[in-house]
Amino acid sequence: MAEHHKLTIEGNEAAAYIAHRTNEVIAIYPITPSSAMGEMSDAWSNQGRKNLWGTTPEVIEMQSEAGAAGTVHGSLQTGALTTTFTSSQGLLLMIPNMYKIAGELTSTVFHVAARSIAAQGLSIFGDHSDVMAVRQTGFALLCSNSVQEVMDFALIAQLITLKSRVPLIHFFDGFRTSHEVNEVIIPSDDLLREMLPESLIRDHRKRALTPDAPVIRGTSQNPDLYFQGRESVNPYYEALPEIVQQCFDQFAELTGRQYRLFEYQGAPDAERLIVLMGSGAEAVSETIEHLVARGEKVGMLKVRLYRPFSSRLLIDSIPATIKKIAVLDRTKEPGSDGEPLYKDIVTALADHVGSGGEHFAAMPRVIGGRYGLSSKEFTPGMIKSVLDELQKDAPKNHFTIGIHDDLTQSSLEWDASFRVDATSSVTRCMFYGLGSDGTVSANKNSIKIIGEDTDLYAQGYFVYDSKKAGAVTISHLRFGPDPIRSSYLIGEGEAHFIACHQPVFLERYDMLAYAEEGAVFLLNSSHSADKVWDDLTTAMQQQIIDKKLQFYVIDAYRVASESGMGRRINTVMQTCFFAISGVLEKDASIAKIKAAVEKTYGRKGAKIVERNFAAIDSALAHLHRVDIPDVATSESAMLAPVSGNAPDFVKNITGEIIAGRGDAIPVSAIPNDGTWPLGTAAFEKRNLALEIPVWDEDICIHCGKCPFVCPHAAIRSKVFSEAQVKDAPESFKHVPVKGREFEAGSRISYQVAPEDCTGCGICVEVCPVRDKSNASHKALNMAPQPPLREQERENWDYFLTLPEYDRNQIRWNGMKGAMLAEPLFEFSGACVGCGETPYIKLATQLFGDRMVIANATGCSSIYGGNLPTTPYTENAEGRGPAWSNSLFEDNAEFGLGFRLAIDAHHDSATKLLQDSGLNLDTNLVTEILQAGQSDEPGIHEQRRRIEAVKEQLATIDSEPARNLESVVDYLVKKSVWIIGGDGWAYDIGFGGLDHAMASGRNVNILVLDTEVYSNTGGQMSKSTPIGAVAKFASGGKAAPKKDLSMIAMAYENVYVGHVAFGAKDLQTLRTFIEAESYDGPSLIIAYSPCIAHGVDLSHNLRQQNLAVDSGHINLLRYDPRRAEQGKNPLQLDSKKPSIPFKEFAQTETRFSMLWRTHPETAEKLMRRAQQGVNERFHHYEQLASLSYEKADEGESS
Amino acid sequence: MIDLTTNYLGMTLKNPLVPSASPLARDPDAAKKLEDAGAAAIVMNSLFEEEVNADEEQLDHLMHHQDIGHGEAASYLPAEDSYKTHLESYLEQLEGLKRSLEIPVIASLNGTTSSGWIRHAKLLQESGADALELNVYYLPTDLAQSAEIVESRYLEILTGLKQQVETPVIMKLSSQFSSVGNFVQKLEKAGADGVSLFNRYYLPDIDLETLDVVPSLKLSTSVESRLSMRWIAMLYGRVNLTLAATSGVHTAGDAIKLLLAGADVTHMCAALLHHGPAHLGEVLKGLEQWMEEKEYSSVTQLKGSVSHAKATNPSAFERSNYIKVLSSFDSPDSVWR
């Protein structure tokens, strides 16, 4: 038998490994959680890694999954071995092509990290909703339950499809398997070759469309033929189950790992049976083992091949003694009388019994239940509860397990403390880290060390929260002498080792609830061993005492900084972990960590290796055991997850979710149609900033630039009278406001929200004022937050109580005035220094109280709407942006739908208003119908009039009055916004964007252009510039950035604006105002620096300036109304490029790294980029200078 | 036939003109042009300590710290195995120059700390560098650092280096030492094979619009070679190590003056950037022509003939130059007043 080696990898890598070795063409579109498969394939191809037959697979990123499916279909039809990777919505978009591929009997394997489908909400997490939605396409469905199975089945699937000509979906649970790190035996190439004979590949090629032996396919068929054609594939599906088992058997001969279509495990005389597929089967397997060992007559059936469904094999696999069966589905079909797997089992049994089959003494009682939707935990306690339910005389059918359904009482109760034998020999460790502190990569490294260098088996699973800044990561690691099948998180009271890498978590998370008795607790704290005890909450101290924990402390930030590691504590914490967890012998493990560091950096990073070694050596000297007193001495408690004055929903639901107790929330408390309230981000005080800006009111010139650039609305300005602040806190700063547009005696304040600020420093950067005696002192200066926290919290709370400046008085054409408007988008979870959020915030300041937003999937939908909180909020009148994320590809159409409906309501209201039967004040009605509403006072007036109408309507008792009431508010102008990133606008949603622009309807389209797919980890978009490195363009993008402005201008009836707030703030402000005023489609392309550019976003503004000065971005406005006035609609707002493109590019890693990896290509692409910059500006310059003067009218005859 | 050969760090060069560290060495074509124009050796563009460190940081960042803890993105830029570090590129460039040129190639290191330099120097030696120019460009901003401390920094690096490599080492110095001559002697004792006088510090500017301190680069002019001339003249004959003149060598006249003062070689940078590599040929021709006209037979012959030890009026190299310039009404000593 050929040699194999063992590696610790995640499920995605296992699938990609085989897919890359066994395919020639890979066409994909990234989607969580399957993106990594495509990325790895692209990386391998770029490294020149070849497939089994010596060629490098061609990897292409398409514009959407629909596009990828089309390309896959085309590639297969022309004879190449082709594959794709996808999940969820992406799989749905592939459906039409899947029917075709199956109908044409084409061999292919699609690897799917199965994920929930967006319904009441989107979820990136795992369940079987997507694969169940394609079970009718004719694709076979093969399910892997573990990382090793993913590796094995990916290979076996390829053989199955080549032998049978039936295409296959190979799926495994998103996140639980796709992202789980576990140990696998990697099959050798010899094994691969033995499994995949070249004759089968030649057969596949022979069926290709080729002019050398031409045929036609995809014909259009009529009633006389189509039905028979559909049935002609029957023999292939009938033969498939046996072929699958043959392939399984062949694999078993070569590896010793035997799989079957349906696999039974349990007591030979079992009476109760659980049937399921996916990672849940691993947990069930542990539980069955545990119960059988205690004499229970239970068993389980793993379903591996779900389509074609072989009823015969199913029946044969179930022990004849079975009397009761619980079928678990990891999906939901609202309106059905049972989920798919359950129904198939029932049908098979009914068919068997109904046709006289005698396998069972009597027809088993079958119940169906749902579990684990969207990676909801599925634990042995839950599994036991299902088996217990089966024991009842009348077990509950259509149950749910894992939630509390107090609405329709479907849920079963379970014992959360139930543990199985499999856990007894396993060491369990949990690590709480901050997203950016390297905890996760250190843990992945630890798993590698333990799993690959010792006889122990290792497993790792990582839980993230929803934020992009200050995100919390919780790593669950397990080690043991046997392979680890526990497909669930470490539970309360189970962990042998708990590490808290950030002291700020002490006041937020109940970490020690997870500690077992005698466990080790490691805390990173700047307090010494004799003082740190006082830093803990009372509850924590009591837990340490009660559970007799071993408590260690280390000042990891100090060790890191002294070793030259800056703020990177991962190596320090990792060293401590090995030293005290007892998983490996201390000296041996230190040596292994050092070896791993050396291996990682190789020759390239000698200095870094040095520093890591210094950190490792010094870590142990600074690790101290803490003496535990006998009683708890602390008086501090954990902070409430939401601040005190929150409304009930926020306290009871949002707060619980923030505290990590969301699983306990019952069904009845969840909004049933996916509707959630606004304004919740304000209650989540995250205290991320180490430093916050301090206002020097003496030198400030009140320019208003700082509120404009703040990504988080954490610094704001208000103007008020002296009288309004007579009861202000002492430290609240305010000064006379500069500017004659304000009433005499008015005061202004610029106030920071100290607990919401992220410390990005961009406000300080933009401040144009310097102290005349000290150039480094500006009107804003950063200072440490902790000493200022209390005082500024009080000031901020007071600031919020001050009335908003009268919007009717605001001068909107200047920054100072515009920035007095209240932002209705605040404190999002966007990255520190995000380049997108200032644009959204601006839009809400200008139009928020009348705004409806259609938001595409992407960063903006995640920071905009990822529960538990949303940054969108209401003003004091209860108005604010109404927001929804539909899908990715349909965002423009979704928003267009908003406009159509709003206009329809407007029409209804107009008609009803004119209905004489209502006896409304005719002057009022005329005013309303003729209202211009072209400015803020106009809208204010209209609102006043509508209120007056409502007052009149309230006195009228008639249907028309009620009807008018339901639409009268639409007589106040509404602002429709279609917001999304470049992934949506340039790629997957471009078709819809085209149609929305061509429609001529009044919509505002805001493209937040980061020039890459930011949310999913930096894949290339058609907006990515030439020479930039991105995933799927790791050798530098060869094609130039698609010029969306130019395309939009071609419609001639679209207002187009290209802006960069950090380069020209006034032009940005003007553009937003003009866009809204234009009664037609408006497109604003907003340049947004992003961390995917490989630059620290404290340089956000500098990067925007460089982008504009180098000509990479040309700021412009194209206003179709100007043409009617005989003026050129195009105005160029940025000047001729004044610095070479290279000067801009070299400041961003996305460009500069190309010189390191492909220096000749870098030079070539830089030259082309410079040429492009010159040519583009010249082109625009010429366009902007064309004459639009109307020709004399007199000539027509 | 005039003998233009000169001794440089133990090597015999065919003439005293050696282009100094500049971007020209990055381009193999430009380097070849310099050789064709007559350059006797070439100093590579400097390998900056900060660049090497920043490079490692960037690589580190690329490999590990793109993770922001968001479930949908494990990283933001593709991790590349083929990432060539700055150091690796430099070594490749050195090897390339050694392959395509016949003249000696001197690698140049620019930094302020000794860590890593020794490792880099070894690598440079392995890649074929004929000599190492060490540019310890250090600006003591800490007022507690006395002249002695500053000097010992240089000596430490040099001593450490000389223990590890066999290639000749030349120290490129700025003029900002309390006692230049004494310091050069110390360097010689510590094992320096030569000194290159004087490096110019690039001086930052203040932007009156933004009130920022901004880096600025102004190339040298001939007048700056006078400082090197003074000290080379003082040192010639009193120390045995190679004396190289740098900064402000633009014309043949400049080069000749420095040779007369006692320089073994004269470096050129700004002039070549300004006029192109062929300019070196012009300077060489000018040197030859002058020597022919004045009937000198070799560079060795004229070298140091107008040094402090041998000049007619050596005090002009000293402070009296100042006084003489101020008052031009003095009579010579030989006249009775």
Image (cartoon, coloured by chain):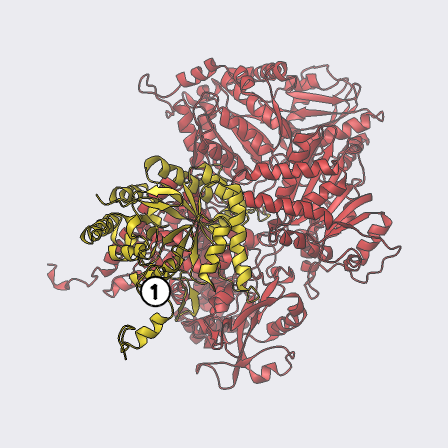
Check the image and report above or below for A178 versus A323. below
A1006 and A328: which one is in front? A1006
Q: Which residue, as the protein is rendered here, is positioned at the far right? A: A630
The answer to which image quadrant residue A317 occupies is top right
Q: Which residue is mark 1?
A: B314
A1076 and B301: which one is in front? B301
Q: Is residue A373 visible?
A: no
Query: For the point 55% across and 69% down, which residue is it?
Result: A781
Q: Quadrant of the N terminus of chain A?
A: top right
Q: Please state the horizontal and vertical placement of residue A2, each as a whole percent of the image.
A: 59, 16
Q: Is residue A530 visible?
A: yes
A269 and A1025: which one is in front? A1025
Which chain is displayed in yellow in the rendered image?
B
Q: Is residue B115 left or right of residue A353?
A: left
B299 and B312: which one is in front? B312
The answer to which image quadrant residue B200 occupies is bottom left
Q: How many marks?
A: 1
Q: Please state the horizontal and vertical placement of residue B260, each as a whole percent of the image.
A: 30, 56
Which chain is displayed in red in the rendered image?
A
Q: Please state the horizontal and vertical placement of residue B222, each as a whole percent of the image.
A: 29, 61
Check the image and report above or below for A1193 versus A139. below
Q: What secondary structure is marked by label 1?
A: helix
Query: For the point 53% across and 71% down, which residue is it?
Result: A780
Q: Chain of mark 1?
A: B
Query: For the point 57% across and 84% down, which residue is it?
Result: A722
Tag 1: amino acid: Pro
Query: For the point 44% across and 18% down, which residue is it?
Result: A204
Check the image and report above or below for A172 versus A507. above
Q: Please state the horizontal and vertical placement of residue A616, each as a whole percent of the image.
A: 67, 45
